Image: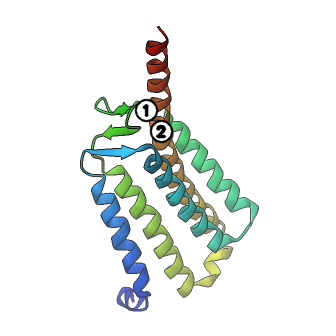
């Protein structure tokens, strides 16, 4: 049955998979990242997360609340963790120096695989959409992925703001 699911998957889905895999694999290496890219990645992945959830549940309030609650919880948890000690922000170039991490790859694959598995499951069993457990687990997964992505970006933005403020204080003195 798994082979049938894969054989009936549109070709563009594999292209998206490999694009996300490539983007995530690049995050495994120490990197220089622009402020705009730090912002764009959680917006794009959050958009995919919301799209995945809304494509299954529409504008139903329960799943939206589950998604939002999970996103807020994960955002809060991520914001409590410090950045890696090697993370630096260059205010002049508006770029971050970040250590390699498997987290972005895991999040991208998590969102993609959730969307893929949910789509395949619903194609075979449309009645899942009406099950309470399904209506809780799927939005919470999507929300958790989004919260982690956004939390990681907010931590970097906070570093940039602190660094810019300190640079402003030094130049004013």
Q: Which mark is residue 78?
A: 2
Q: Residue at x 43, y 87 (%)?
A: 9
Place residue 125 in its image quadrant. bottom right
**Mark 2 secondary-structure assignment:** helix
- Report the residue that reaches farthest toward the top: 173
Up/down of 145 relative to 131, above or below? above
Number of numbered callouts drawn: 2
Front residue (pair 137, 47): 47
In the displayed structure image, the side of residue 111 where residue 136 appears, left or right: right
Q: Residue at x 38, y 53 (%)?
A: 104
* Marks 2 and 1 close (CB-CB < 8 Å): yes
Front residue (pair 76, 133): 76
Dot 1: within a 10 Å radius of its alpha carbon, few (fewer than 14), some, or many (20 or more) residues? few
Q: Which mark is residue 81?
A: 1
- Structural distance between the alpha carbons of marks 2 and 1: 5 Å
Up/down of 145 relative to 1, above or below? above
Q: Residue at x 46, y 54 (%)?
A: 41
Residue 128 place in picture, x, y as percent:
61, 77
Dot 2: within a 10 Å radius of its alpha carbon, few (fewer than 14), some, or many (20 or more) residues? many
Place residue 55 in its image quadrant. bottom right
**Mark 1 secondary-structure assignment:** loop
- Report the residue that reaches farthest toward the left: 29
């Amino acid at each position: 049955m798994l082979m049938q699911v894969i054989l009936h998957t549109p070709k563009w889905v594999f292209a998206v998979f490999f694009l996300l895999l490539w983007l995530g694999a690049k995050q495994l290496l120490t990197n220089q990242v622009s402020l705009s890219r730090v912002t764009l990645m959680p917006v794009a992945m959050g958009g995919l997360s919301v799209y995945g959830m809304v494509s299954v549940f529409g504008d139903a309030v329960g799943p939206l609340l589950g998604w939002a609650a999970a996103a807020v919880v994960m955002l809060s948890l991520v914001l409590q963790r410090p950045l890696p000690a090697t993370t630096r922000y260059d205010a002049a170039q508006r770029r971050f120096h970040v250590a390699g991490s498997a987290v972005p790859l895991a999040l991208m694959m998590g969102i993609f695989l959730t969307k893929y598995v949910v789509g395949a499951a619903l194609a075979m069993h449309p009645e899942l959409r009406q099950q309470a457990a399904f209506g809780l687990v799927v939005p919470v997964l999507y929300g958790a992925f989004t919260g982690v992505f956004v939390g990681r970006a907010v931590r970097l933005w906070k570093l940039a703001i602190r660094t810019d403020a300190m640079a402003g204080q030094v130049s004013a003195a």
